[in-house]
Image: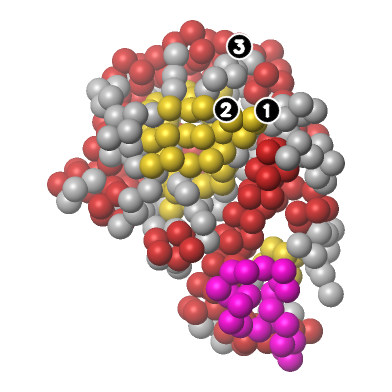
Amino acid sequence: MMPFRFEILTRDTRTQARLGRLTTPHGQLTTPVFMPVGTQASVKTVTPEELLACRAEIVLANTYHLYLRPTHTLIRQLGGLHRFMHWDRPILTDSGGFQVYSLAGLRKLTEEGALFQSHLNGSRHLLTPEKAIDIQESLGSDIAMVLDECVPYPAEHHYALASQELTTRWARRSKDAQRRTDQALFGIVQGSMYADLREKSARELVEIGFDGYALGGFCVGETKQVMYDLIAHTASCLPEARPRYLMGVGTPADLLHCVKRGIDMFDCVMPTRNARNGCLFTRQGKLIIKNARYADDMRPVDPLCQCYTCQHYSRAYLRHLFVAEEILGLRLNTIHNLHYYMDVMQLIRSAIAEGRLESLQAEDISGAVGQGEQG
């Protein structure tokens, strides 16, 4: 079984970007990398074989949801998460901290952990740092995350400070609770939108020592420029020799901007959720497939795309499926969007390897995304 290892293969000389290789017990992958979100041990609407066809190298699963249903103990009894979901490539599991944060009125934070009510049946649970590690070790993921508190935006400095310090204490307890030697553990930098707190959080986590470091608490309402500037500052406070993972971000343009600021790993529901809502990403801009203009459009979603959807189906057919509420439409849309995101990451990796990342612009990978629909 291969041990966890991160190697930097190439550094971009004009930005903070790195081309790397991440080795895990379930295989290697190249960074920068995008992880499709498989919340309940499934990337919605697609099979593992279709994920591989889209060139996905690693997926993310959700600790909170799998703890509640079907339970981590059952998954362990059935051979672990990889066998359970028929995915023999790397898996990263989050700690459940963001899901607990999103429960709002259904949870209470204490020094011991997060006390919350299940969104399924109202049952009460206490998620401690130790429990979060135990769950993830039972699941058998390749990369586990410490329990953290995600701060709402905006937040007063004193609140953000108290939250950041709690996250550090929880991180230390998470590290102490770790028992598996074949599972990497990442710390999570918090501190809201305060550069001094982000720097303090990073310094304290590095002192504890983790296999990698995540940046949490972004894309919660702040402006893009604030996010980009703070990500760059935070990444500069983290060790060069460890992978940096930006949680829950984002658009194709975000991926490019944040790679240039030193980020190696990403996850986001954007490609899959948008696909199920009929929004498709293309090099020419976003395409809202339900619009009447596509009713007789025999072109593929993106003429430059080599995905299964674009090679076999027209915009007219995809519009018909979506309007008729046929499940096949959601599957084909998701296959396209995931393939598109993997194309974006491959384009970025190639640009780093060839020393031309600085000249690569958001418009080169996402057309008019965010500026209106293509024609």
Q: Mark 1: few, some, or many residues within 10 Å (few <14, many ≥20)?
A: some
What residue did someone put label 2 on? Answer: 8
Q: Quadrant of residue 222?
A: top right
Real-space Cα distance between discs 1 and 2?
7 Å
- The outermost residue toward the bottom is 296
Q: Earlier in the sequence, mark 3 or mark 2?
A: 2
Residue at image point 29% right, 20% down: 177
Q: Please state which amino acid type lies under the numbered disc 3.
A: Lys
In the depicted view, which residue is nearer to us: 49 or 144? 49
Magenta residues (range): 295-315
Callouts 3 and 2 close, C-beta under 8 Å? no
Q: Position of residue 36 (x, y in %)?
A: 51, 52
Q: Which secondary structure lies at badge 3?
A: helix
Front-lying residue, 42 or 127? 42
For residue 246, side relative to residue 121 (left or right): right
* Label 3, label 2: how far apart the Cα atoms are: 25 Å
**Measured along the vertical axis of the image, is residue 274 above or below residue 214?**
below
- Report the residue that reaches farthest toward the front: 354
Residue named by callout 1 = 11
Which of the two residues, 8 or 262, is positioned nearer the viewer here? 8
Q: How many marks?
A: 3
- Residue 252 in the image: x percent, y percent? 70, 50
Q: Upstream in the sequence, badge 1 or badge 3? A: 1
The residue under label 1 is which amino acid type?
A: Arg
Quadrant, the N terminus: top left
**CA gap, disc 1 to disc 3?**
26 Å
Could you tell me what secondary structure mostly forms the magenta stretch? loop
Residue picked out by circle 3: 200
**Residue 27 is inside the magenta segment:** no
Left or right for 57, reference 144: right
Contact (CB < 8 A) between labels 1 and 2?
yes
